[in-house]
């Protein structure tokens, strides 16, 4: 009878330790999920900022202006174009 009580007490103790361990693991995983959610929100905001910046920088009039100012490019006109033909074999 005494051995049964001791065995029951040990089983309760093991069960309590398992419960505490399980709760701790659950809290740790919840903290990881929360951190991952915050990181995802930060990355979404960064992506939105980068997409807006890309849209702003890729406006055709801006590209045309930069090509003229920085590269000295000019529009193609018939007066400044040279046409060649390839000889037939």
Image (spheres, rainbow, N blue to C red):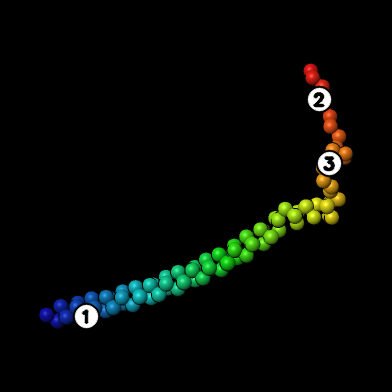
Q: Could you tell me residue 74's position as x and y percent? A: 84, 47
Tell me whether the residue at label 1 lies in contact with that at label 2, contact meaning CB atoms closer than 8 angstroms.
no
Q: Quadrant of the C terminus?
A: top right
N-terminal label among 1 and 3: 1
Within-10-Å neighbours for mark 2: few <14, some 14–19, many 20+: few
N-terminal label among 1 and 2: 1
- The residue under the point 49% across, 68% down is 36
- State whether residue 20 is above or below residue 54: below
Q: Which residue is mark 2?
A: 86
Q: Secondary structure at mark 3?
A: loop
Q: Could you tell me residue 24's position as x and y percent? A: 38, 76
Residue 9 got which mark?
Answer: 1
Numbered disc in front, either 1 or 2 = 2
Q: Could you tell me residue 58's position as x and y percent? A: 70, 55
Residue 77 got which mark?
Answer: 3
Residue that lies at the very extreme toward the right in this rendered image: 79
Q: Could you tell me residue 32's position as x and y percent? A: 46, 70
């Amino acid at each position: 009878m005494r051995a049964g009580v001791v065995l029951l007490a040990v089983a309760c103790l093991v069960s309590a330790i398992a419960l505490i361990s399980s709760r701790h693991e659950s809290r740790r995983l919840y903290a990881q999920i929360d951190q991952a959610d915050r990181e995802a929100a930060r990355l979404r905001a960064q992506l939105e900022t980068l997409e807006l910046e890309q849209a702003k920088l890729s406006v055709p009039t801006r590209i045309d202006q930069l090509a003229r100012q920085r590269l000295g490019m000019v529009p193609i006109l018939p007066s400044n174009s040279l046409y060649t033909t390839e000889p037939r074999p």
